[in-house]
Each structure stands twice: as C-alpha cells, then as structure tokens.
C-alpha cells in the first residue's frame, strides 16, 4: 500500500481527497500547516507528497525547496489555485514533479498520482537487488535464495526460473513464455524440459514447507501464488 502525505489547509478539500484516495487503497496522512508538513515529510517515509502552495506557517514552494535539500527522490505534486505559467514554473523549479490547478477533477488527480508512482517503480526496482514473495527471498547480486530463514541451493537454470516466477507473481506463465524468457529459445512441444526443471525447482523450494508456491494449470502453464 502506497503512503501519501497530503499538506492542505482547506479541511474540506483535504477530507475529500483523503477519502477518495483511501477508496483506491492509498494510505493518506493529512497535514494542515506548512511547518508541520516539512517536519513530517523529513521524519517519515512517504511514497508521494501532495503539497498545497498557500498554507499557513510556510508556503508549499518553500516546503518543497527545503525538502529537496535532503530528499530528492519522493515525487511531489503541487495542488494550488495559482494557475499562471509563472506560478507553475515557480512550483516546478522549487522541486515539484507535477502541478495541478484547483478546481480539479478527482480522476485527473488520481491519474497524475499513478503516473508519478509509475515513474518511481523502475528506479526503485533497479536499485533493489532482491525479489520476494511470501517467505522466499531471491538476491540477484549474491545469487542466493532463502525461504523462511533457510538457505536454498539452486543451479543456475533453477535460479533463473525462480527469478522469472518472482517477477510475475500470481500470473499464469505458459511453457512457451518460460522457454523464451528463461531459456531464450522457442518452445518445442515435443520436449518436457520446462516441466522437468519446474519439478526440480519445486522439490528444492517446497520440500519441508507446508505451503506450496508453484501451481500447475493443466494444459496452460504454471503460476506462483
């Protein structure tokens, strides 16, 4: 669940935005004052910040400028009634990533939030070298796999296969897709090499554990769930 910080002194707007975002499974913290907002944004980790420009204590431009001195990564979306080109340029130059003028449609706000979070995902995934699902963790740097604290020793091909499953949890992977992405070959319907290696992998990551992770969809492929 993404955590959003909302700095907005208009309690009606803040309440409507918070309620709408929470309906879309975002966790929202509202802050009515610029100084309090800057403190909260520096002390807590947020996935995205929505920042009103006209606030008591400290305006949103200055909050954003000071925040950027210590945090250049978190996406910041300005929400304001100031809609001139100069106002937008000022907001963006202070470090904001996007600028939405009041009044606005909630659908547009939601779309902009989703777009900003999508931009963050590639950077986050490239910076991270671990993939995890349930109680299993794969480290792409050290080439190690751990499940529930227990080291799992895999061959190179088993490791590649598990990595593929972990990148696509809860998604049905056909044998053809697995062949093309784990083996870089076209799938030969006359061979059972995919089934053999999936069974090898299953034996290593599921043996001794109550919960099974890799499930067969007969005639269709496999799924990590």
Image (cartoon, helix red, strand yellow):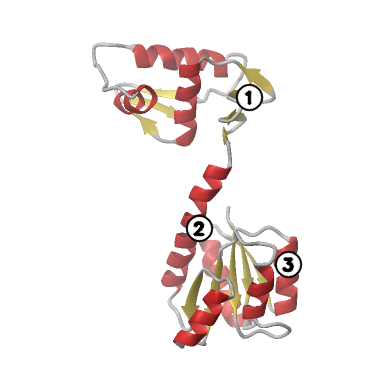
- Where is residue 116 drawn, in percent x and y? 49, 61
Q: Which of marks 3 and 2 is nearer the N terminus?
A: 3
Q: To which residue does mark 2 refer?
A: 117
| Residue at 46%, 29% in the rendered image | 165
Residue 39 located left or right of residue 160: right
Mark 1 and mark 2 lie on one chain; the one further toward the N terminus is 2
Nearest the camera: 216 or 7? 7
The label number, if any, that marks residue 216 in the structure image: none
> In 3D space, how far apart are the residues under numbered discs 1 and 3 (Cα atoms)?
36 Å
Q: Which of marks 1 and 3 is in front?
A: 3
| Residue 127 location (% of width, % of height) | 57, 44
Name the residue tied to disc 3.
40
Q: In this view, does 223 lie above or below 71?
A: above
* Precedes in sequence: disc 1 or disc 3: 3
Vertical relation: 189 (above or below) 181: above
Q: Where, by quadrant of the figure, is residue 33 drawn?
A: bottom right
Residues at marks 1 and 2, CA–CA distance in whole angstroms:
29 Å
Q: Is residue 19 above or below residue 133?
A: below
Residue matched to label 1: 147
Q: In this view, does 185 lie to the left or right of 182?
A: left
The residue positioned 67% from the left and 26% from the top of the image is: 148
Other-residue count near label 1 (Cα within 10 Å), few / some / many at <14 / 14–19 / ≥20: some
- For mark 2, give the secondary structure: helix
Of 103 and 47, which appears nearest the observer?
Answer: 47
Asked if residue 33 can be seen in this view, the reply is no
Picture quarter containing residue 62? bottom right
Q: Quadrant of residue 50?
A: bottom right
Q: Are marks 1 and 2 in contact (CB under 8 Å)?
A: no
Place of residue 224 in the rendered image (x, y in percent of width and height, measured from the top left):
47, 29
């Amino acid at each position: 669940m993404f955590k959003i910080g909302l700095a907005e002194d208009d309690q009606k707007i803040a309440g409507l935005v918070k309620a709408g975002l929470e309906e879309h499974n975002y966790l929202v913290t509202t802050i009515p004052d610029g100084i309090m907002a800057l403190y909260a944004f520096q002390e807590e980790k947020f996935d995205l910040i929505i920042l009103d420009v006209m606030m008591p204590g400290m305006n949103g431009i200055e909050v954003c400028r000071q925040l950027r001195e210590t945090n250049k990564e978190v996406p910041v979306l300005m929400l304001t009634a100031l809609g001139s080109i100069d106002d937008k340029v000022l907001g963006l130059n202070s470090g904001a990533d996007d600028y939405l003028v009041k009044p606005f449609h909630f659908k547009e706000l939601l779309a902009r939030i989703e777009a900003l979070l999508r931009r963050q995902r590639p950077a986050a995934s490239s910076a991270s070298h671990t993939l995890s699902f349930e109680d299993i963790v794969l480290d792409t740097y050290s080439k190690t796999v751990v499940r529930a604290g227990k080291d799992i020793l895999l061959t190179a091909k088993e490791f590649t296969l598990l990595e593929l499953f972990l990148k696509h949890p809860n998604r049905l992977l056909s044998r053809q897709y697995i062949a093309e992405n784990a083996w870089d070959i076209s799938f030969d319907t006359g061979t059972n090499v995919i089934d053999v290696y999936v069974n090898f992998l299953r034996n290593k990551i599921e043996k001794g554990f109550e919960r099974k992770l890799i499930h067969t969809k007969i005639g269709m492929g496999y799924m990590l769930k």
